[in-house]
Image (cartoon, rainbow, N blue to C red):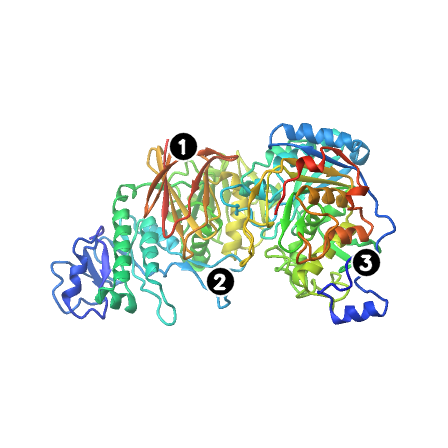
Amino acid sequence: MPESIPFRWPASWADAANLELLKGAPIDCIAGDAPPPFSLGGLPFVRLDKDRPPEGLNLQEGVWPGVVAATRKDTAGGGATGAAWVDSNASVVRLAQLRKPGKMVWLTYTPPAGNTVVPLDGFVKPITEAEAYGAHWVIALDGFFAGQIAKRDEKALGQWQRMMAALRFAQSRRGQRPWEPVAPLTVASTFEGDDKLLSEEFLNLAPRRHLAYRALLASDIGARSFAGQKAVIYLENTPPRGAVLASLLEFAQAGGLLIAPLGTVDSPPEERRSEHSVRRAGKGRVAMPLQKWEDPFTLVDQVHVLLSHREDPVQMWNGADVDAFYVASPNQDRAVARLVPYASGPTLPITLSFRKTYRRARVVTLAGEKAVQPARGQLGTEIAVPEFTDYAEVELED
Amino acid sequence: MIKATSPCWTRRQWMAAAAGLAAPRIHAAPAAPSSPVALARCPAYDNRVLAGMRKMFDQLGGIGALVSGKTVAVKINMTGSPRDRTGYRPAWDTRWSHPVVIAAAVHLIGEAGARRVRILEGSTEDDHPLEENFLIGGWDPADLLAAAPKVEMENTGFLGYGKEYKRLKVSDGGLVYSEFDVNHSYSECDVMVSIAKLKEHEQTGLSLSLKNMVGIVPGTVYGDSAGYDQPAERPYGALTMFHKGNRQPPEGTPPEKDPQSSREPGYRIPRIAVDLVRARPVDLAIIDGIEAQTAGSGASLDAGSPRKIRLVNPAILIASRNPVCADAVAAAAMGFDPMASRGTPPFENCDSTLELAEQAGIGARDLKKLEIRGATIAAVRTPFR
């Protein structure tokens, strides 16, 4: 079941005739609140009950991905700093994977209701977004799309085929599931309690600032190595104690940067930087906020400066609304940067710069692939990614 | 002269002019000062930049007397988001002062005996250390920090490393503002160097060493993030207050002189640029015209613009002790007439900053009055249109 790709049977499809549509498609189960009143031709039905998820599955609601439209015609919705507001499922998926490792995450959201109209070509992005982070979207059509397909409208069928092609593309990359994020920062937290919103939003907003991270449950501190990490933020407003504190300080003393809540250590600060006081700890540093952490978006920016953009494993230009999820194989000889754009329409020409030097690179989109010559940039290996829609990835080899 | 028939005048201005008061009008100084302009060919951002700039400074009579023993502020240009590129081209090649040019200038300033060199730029989107914005843009600032002894950087878009904003008075009272509140760096310096890019601007026609000075104001005071009671802590957003005059700065910061004056960007920004140069005079102007882009000052143009950005390689460097003289030569090298007024390219929709600056007595723009040393304009002209 975990590897099954689910499809939510549209309410308006009153008979089994549309099962024909699924023949040869990579969809292999029907999901929903209740099964349709007819035989599904051998396809299993999966009840989407979050409280009693099927074996091997982790059901998360999620949100329709995209840049939130504003009421004014000439601008997108904005966050507190004027940056476009993006609805993304990246952190929902990654946090779910962290909490329940080994279970496949299914995102169960449906197309937006009310006055929001989703264009037919807008149904590929939910698939590519979920798959980029190793999850499945429970494919759901809105009333219009389902109706057009039922009428065998050519345009709707064409878009359906694009969706199926996106699924096949993702299936061909299943072997990369164990690949780990390339990130210099570990975000450690309980992701519960009073600071749940702060910590979850930090993960949600980090991609807006292109801050790459690995997430870690506070309970796993000590059990997992911080090898290769430049910084760890202990994202709670209550200071760590006991063995947790000892593990974190050990990381700092070995040369890392520990960013921890007020009261974590009491040694005198050496400098003030990015609204944090910074003190030496062995070969490394401990940074504590001048005031209690409150605003996750500001904190992401402050952490990025404390860490320094010099440590970014990948940089991106012209991708303000694009997430670059950069993962590498266990022996680091292969890697892929998965590019998930959230605005509609084609992206701008994007440049990626990788700190690591790669000898070969390919830009792969849903429309095809192209070998590209990595170029030497000022700060790393630069790859030019032509305009694309919905999804692209840059495959890299040593 | 700026014509009295300028379409952006308000009824109040018309009446004032008719009454002989000429409120916003600037009378030409009897003779705006002129300084020699060094013009050099430099085909690429390589070691020829340092050699070329050294020769240019020699052609200007050297900079030792100007900078020796002094704290030198170097205002560079890093317009717009550091995460944006024009196509695949780094901002350094298109719209920003190139780090190789900055490093060459810093090196020579240090070599000439400056006590301290401070590289300055105000971000309109963050309160990062300036070094971080170089990294975001894709350049290691270590090159610049090592270009001379005692080189520092500061993001002047907010308080930065200062404890309070410093007030600069506009000599002669100003056209739009009579005083500005700025980051401490612009008052705690002895010498001001403006390193600009050779480029056009959608609202001011040109963005050269004069216009570069608009960027000395902090976004926390004059940007969209500014509070009404007090400056914001962090900058973000454009300087809409400058462009459109939609509001006044926070309480406690001097407001503009006449809130009834034109709100048109093409009227306001050239005048504000002149005000800022009179508040913090430019002692040395350097214009990076090695590689550049046409049509606009950002990575993209305003929606609906009929123009398209084109990458150009004028392969020139310009320097002068007078920013108006430097900009006049730059305009000519771009294929424009520095004597042009509103309605004539590149000032189709704005008053000419050059003309206003000349009238304000900052410097001469008439090529016939300028001594150009090095290459000739005819030899280097690269038409931007």
For residue B6, which quarter of the picture?
bottom right
User: CA separation, marks 2 and 1?
Assistant: 37 Å
User: CA separation, marks 3 and 1?
Assistant: 60 Å
Instruction: Identify which amino acid the numbered label 3 is placed on.
Output: Ile
Q: Residues within 10 Å of mark 2 (few under 14, many from 20)?
A: some
Relative image position of residue B156 (x, y in whole percent): 67, 48
In this rendering, the label closer to the viewer, 2 or 3: 3
For residue B379, which quarter of the picture?
top right
Q: Chain of mark 1?
A: A
Residue linked to disc 2: A77
Relative image position of residue B110 (x, y in whole percent): 72, 31
Q: Is residue A157 above or below residue B278?
A: below
Q: Is residue A70 above or below residue B195?
A: below
- Which residue occupies 69% across, 33% down? B40
| Residue B256 visible to the viewer | yes
Q: Earlier in the sequence, mark 2 or mark 1?
A: 2
Horizontal side of A116 relative to B77 (left or right) equals: left
Q: Do callouts 2 and 3 mark residues in contact (Cβ within 8 Å)? A: no
Instruction: Identify which amino acid the numbered label 1 is placed on.
Output: Tyr
Instruction: Please tell me the numbered disc located at residue A358.
Output: 1
Marks 3 and 1: same chain? Answer: no
Relative image position of residue A219 (x, y in whole percent): 37, 48
Residue linked to disc 3: B26
Which of B224/A144 is in front?
Answer: A144
Q: Secondary structure at mark 2?
A: loop
Relative image position of residue A386 (x, y in whole percent): 42, 45
Instruction: Identify which amino acid the numbered label 2 is placed on.
Output: Gly
Horizontal side of B141 relative to A4 (left or right) equals: right
Q: Secondary structure at mark 1?
A: loop
Q: Residues within 10 Å of mark 3 (few under 14, many from 20)?
A: some
